[in-house]
Image (cartoon, rainbow, N blue to C red):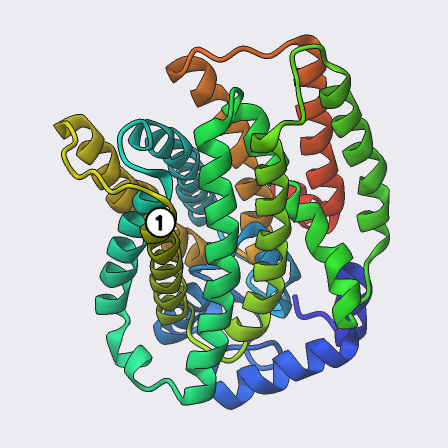
Amino acid sequence: MNQSIASVATEEGISDVTLYSWLKQCRQDGVPVPGNQPTANTWSPDAKLAVGIETAALSEVELAADPRDAKGGEDINLSTHHKADLLLLLTTVLAAAGWIFSREAVQGLAPLLFMALRFISAGLILAVIGWSAMRAFTRQQWRSACLVGVFFGAAMSFWILGLEMATHVGVGAFLTGLGVVMVPLISLLFGDRAGPYVFMSIPFVMAGLACLSLDAEFHLGLAEVFFLLSALFIALMFILNSRAAARLPALPLTAVQLLVTGLITGIVSLFIETWDFNQPPAIWGWLVASVLIATSLRFLLQTRGQSLAPPSHTAIIMTLEPVWTALFAALWLGESMTALQFSGCALIFLAMLVNRWPAVRAWIRHH
């Protein structure tokens, strides 16, 4: 059902000024918003498609904080609900598989070069699909999209360097996942209000990091620092992206972000790395898998899944990515965790759930 601006502001910890601004902009752009048609079952096919495309590139953090979470899409039938959950679950599996694909690819390709090839290729694919909307971008819209891409490029640069050096890919996934907790806290600097669940999640984060730090096999080395810096820049990117996504279609916005990220990592790679394209077929296979499966196909399935369910469902299901990553790292890379490491990751995962408790509660209500 529709919610008032005041209730959404209180529940999500977003200022009412920001919500009113988003709502006004959505109405001006013709995006479906609360107030007209009460449920997703009464939307026209065009409205459902618009909502799906508008949320295509949003992360679980953005989706949980997006005012369109109150658009009234909660009344969905059981079969559609399960189909959406299945698609979103598969999305998290593909996202986690991207960690393994990337880890294998950087065994041959220089890490920043790999990221440049991956994101430019994926960006071009999405740019072809969303070219008509991208062509209509104004100079200000290009500036907004490119700025998000700059922060995303910095985040991915730290992420891939951390992944190359990491001794525990699973632990790195949970450290990167701390961006979920950082977003509401950093949003305070942008005038947004943080809800009580944000502060309730902090003790779990501290306890989780303490468990990891106290473990004899865990060292806060350069790889872990890179993962934490990646989480910081991802959080900043999410905040900027949520504002850009209120004014720009998500598909071309994502294409620009990926292309800018690819250009940034490529330029940095040109100066600090040695390019060696004489790689065995297996390395190129991992690159292709990263582009087609972990990036392009992932966003396609995410778009479809989000068009069938409320964003609150996506918010909670997408937090499974680090869990799958840890499992794949154990199965494919032969990694293992000590009891303290496992406890630390579990506490960080619990912090993510506490941080997004309104979304968790909405998800439980439908099961």
Counting other residues with Cα less than 10 Å from the Cα at mark 1, is it few (<14), some (14-19), or many (20 or more)? Answer: many
Residue drawn at point x = 81 percent, y = 28 percent: 207
Describe residue 189's horizontal placement relative to residue 22 as left or right.
right
Q: Nearer the viewer, residue 364 or 206?
A: 206
Q: Nearer the viewer, residue 65 or 70?
A: 65
Q: Nearer the viewer, residue 252 or 223?
A: 223
Residue drawn at point x = 38 percent, y = 29 percent: 103
On-image quarter of the C terminus: top right
Describe residue 256's horizontal placement relative to residue 117 as left or right.
right
On the image, the x and y values in percent for residue 190 come to 74, 70
Looking at the picture, does residue 152 appear above or below residue 99?
below
Element type where label 1 sits in the image: helix
Looking at the picture, does residue 293 appear above or below residue 335?
below
Count of marks overlaid on the render? 1
Residue drawn at point x = 72 percent, y = 14 percent: 215
Q: Amino acid at mark 1?
A: Ser
Describe residue 282's horizontal placement relative to residue 3 as left or right.
left
Residue drawn at point x = 70 percent, y = 39 percent: 353
Q: Hey, which quadrant is residue 310 in on the image?
A: bottom right
On-image quarter of the N terminus: bottom right
Q: Nearer the viewer, residue 255 or 164?
A: 164
Res 184 seen here: yes
On the image, the x and y values in percent for residue 263 come to 34, 61
Res 296 seen here: no
Q: Hey, which quadrant is residue 228 in on the image?
A: top right
Looking at the picture, does residue 34 appear above or below residue 324?
below
On the image, the x and y values in percent for residue 8 come to 75, 67
Q: Which residue is mark 1?
A: 269
Looking at the picture, does residue 345 appear above or below residue 34?
above
On the image, the x and y values in percent for residue 11 come to 79, 60
